[in-house]
Amino acid sequence: LDSKVSSTLSVRMMATLRSVGCHNAAALLRPLSSTPRVLVGRSVHVEARLEELGIVLPPPGGPKANYNSVSWDGNLLYVSGQLPVMGADGALLTGTVGPAGREGYLTLEEGYQAARCCGLSIVSTIQSEIGDLDRVEKVVKLFGIVNSHPEFQEQHLVMNGASDLLCEVFPDLPKHARSAIGTNTLPLGVATEVEAIVRIRD
């Protein structure tokens, strides 16, 4: 990993990635420290940008109960809550995000990476539904939920993982609206869940 990634990943996170066979950690877990480059007139296709960034999307996640992964209302695509998939085998990042220094809990940085994984799953699900990611006209809103210790109050920073990822993949789109909340549990024990509303051009 490059120094930027190495400086932010905890030993526990790296061990988790190795255990699920993730061989592209630098792209999957890269934190963002600079303003994304703005592309004029979509001179670079989104799929080409993914390749440029070294990002490999996970397989699109299917519904885990009685609902659809997406729902259309006109040109708005509602993407159901996506979970933090870390590897091609569908392994999930589980755990509860806690205050700094609290043993047995995920750190803020690990929560950020879980939200980033959710962002990748959102992009993968959109691509599976519409094919060409250049048809994404606007990411209207994200809604993120963090599996949190009762004393943890930085859910908004955790959700930057998903927001930063989408700004990196779609740098020329307007910035989205967003909500972030904490809860005492999430399905399958995952650390984060993020849903999206996206406007698609014909």
Image (tube, helix red, strand yellow):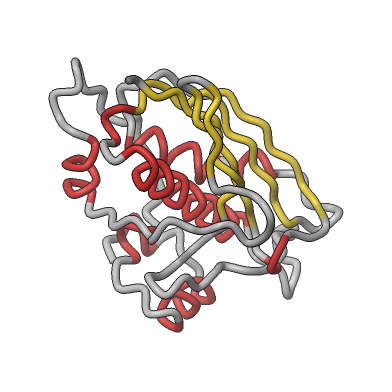
Residue 32 in percent (x, y) is at 39, 43
Compared to residue 127, the image places residue 137 above or below, namely above
Q: Quadrant of residue 94?
A: bottom right
Residue shown at the point (15%, 30%) measured from the top left: 44
Compared to residue 72, the image places residue 75 above or below, namely above
Q: How many marks?
A: 0
The furthest residue to the bottom: 19
- Which quarter shows the N terminus? bottom left
- Tell which of 180 and 62 is nearer to you: 62
Residue 56 in percent (x, y) is at 28, 57
Residue shown at the point (16%, 42%) measured from the top left: 48
Residue shown at the point (50%, 56%) measured from the top left: 113
Q: Is residue 11 left or right of residue 6?
A: right
- Which quarter shows the C terminus? top left
- Tell which of 90 and 119 is nearer to you: 90
Q: Is residue 88 left or right of residue 56?
A: right
Compared to residue 74, the image places residue 87 above or below, namely below
Q: Is residue 69 left or right of residue 155?
A: left
Residue shown at the point (50%, 43%) measured from the top left: 162
